[in-house]
Image: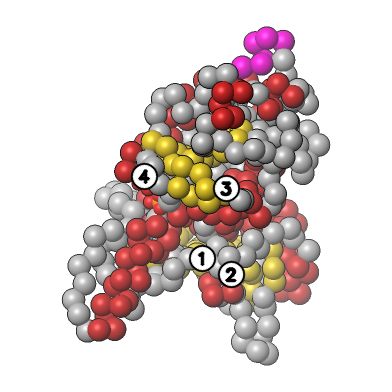
Amino acid sequence: MPRDAEAQTPSSIEAPGEKAPAVAIVGATGAVGAELLRCLEKRDFPVRHLRLLASPRSAGRTLRFRDAELPVEALTGTSFAGIDLALFSAGAEISRRYAPLAVEAGAVVVDNSSAFRKDPAVPLVVPEVNAATLARHCGIVANPNCVAAVAVVALAPLHRVRPIRRIVASTYQAASGAGAAAMEELVRSTEAHLRGEPFEPKVLPHSAAFNVFSHNAAVDPESGYNGEELKFMAEVRRLLDVPDLPIGITCIRVPVLRTHAISLSIELEAPLSTEEARSLLAAAPGVRLVDDRAANHFPMPSEASGEDEVLVGRLRTDLADPSGRTLALFVAGDQLLKGAALNAVQIAELLLGQAMPHPSFGHPRDAGRGGSRRHSPSAREVAS
Ligand code: NAP
Ligand code: 2RA
């Protein structure tokens, strides 16, 4: 479709500059999609056109972005014509099917699903941790699993100074990790519980109200670990670049609307005092230290929800390890933000070269034409 014609369609918005990219959000009506819209707006991300995509169920709905009420369109194979940046958050099956079509159409994809996270050709990126890996993208960048992303923001500053040798973790994961419908189900199950009425869950496997249960991902019969735990292990190893890092983890769903919390015990190469750990974390990007022993005030979902930073505290030497090399800590991060939407928009900012000098939206299609993936984009490449 000619760009001028596209600009007239109701799914496009007037944007603040010719070089701003045309953006599509796949899964715009979901829990992550809603936060993607908020993050783009809050961070004043340049957007020339915005196309909102979801299932046919949502076609015709409208969502607000900046001062415009934009229609939601049903995702199809031709949805990416004219799109420069496609932010995917509609599940792995949709990403596997449509992300290659988006790349083929000339877009760079930032994918929130698990579809490409294990693919060595696709960088798995948390900007505070491994931004440099972004430079080798070939059209798709993977956003990590939400609990892995939140954890590594706290782990990386320690790992850089005292390499981590082993991790033991337990998670306390919010209902919204299972999507907008699970969030709604937590509210309805709580109301039913308070009224003393029975409640039949349809989204989560058990009633979430006043309850905790093992994460709803399928359990691998051989190892006994569920899919969420296996993702955490594989992705933390990749993000910290320690392929054989021993990790044990138990993932648990708790009756919290948003923000995943994680209890971590990390064995380090050599002892690190809690004072040293505190000062490393206090200076770390994306981290807010909440570690007030006197007031018994540590990271909580109620204080992390809606916040960009990951809260870190309860720093102690783990007494289970007599060598003194193991540190215990507690982390809480809004997984809809740092674990998904915020991280994706931060990646997009890096791609756009807003916050980092080198990467750009330069696309692999240009490589075969003598182009480079690391050159500064022309107006046509970025804005067309
Ligand atoms: P959600 O609230 O259930 O939203 C799912 C979105 O996908 C909706 O917009 C839905 O559109 C859309 N969708 C479903 N089927 C579709 C289809 N056939 N074609 C086009 N769009 C379709 O889920 P979510 O929590 O936002 O999660 C979305 C993705 O992000 C998942 O891959 C998830 O693993 C990942 N993620 C989630 C979190 C989190 O904390 N929730 C964190 C990290 C990553 P309709 O409204 O039209 O059904
Ligand atoms: C969860 N990690 O909390 C997932 C979100 N995709 O279930």
Magenta residues (range)? 365-370
Q: Nearer the viewer, residue 123 or 376?
A: 376
Q: Is mark 4 within 8 Å of ligand 1?
A: yes
Q: Which mark is residue 68?
A: 3
The C terminus, quarter of image: top right
Pinpoint residue 302: horizontal percent, then vertical percent: 54, 75
Residue occupying the point 68% across, 83% down: 292
Disc 3 from disc 4: Cα separation: 18 Å
- Callout 4: few (<14), some (14-19), or many (20+) C-alpha neighbours within 10 Å? some
Tag 2 and tag 1, C-beta contact below 8 Å: yes
- Label 4 or label 2, whichever lies nearer to me, is 4
Tag 3 and tag 4, C-beta contact below 8 Å: no
The image quadrant of residue 271 is bottom right
Q: Nearer the viewer, residue 178 or 297?
A: 178
Residue that badge 4 annotates: 58
Residue that badge 2 annotates: 304
Residue occupying the point 60% across, 35% down: 49
In this view of the protein, can residue 69 be seen by the observer?
yes
The number of numbered badges drawn on the structure is 4
**Of label 3 and label 1, which has the lower sequence position?**
3
Q: Is residue 294 left or right of residue 58?
A: right
In this view of the protein, can residue 118 be seen by the observer?
no
Disc 1 from disc 4: Cα separation: 26 Å
**Of label 2 and label 1, which has the lower sequence position?**
1
Disc 2 from disc 1: Cα separation: 7 Å
Pinpoint residue 12: horizontal percent, then vertical percent: 56, 35
Disc 3 from disc 1: Cα separation: 29 Å
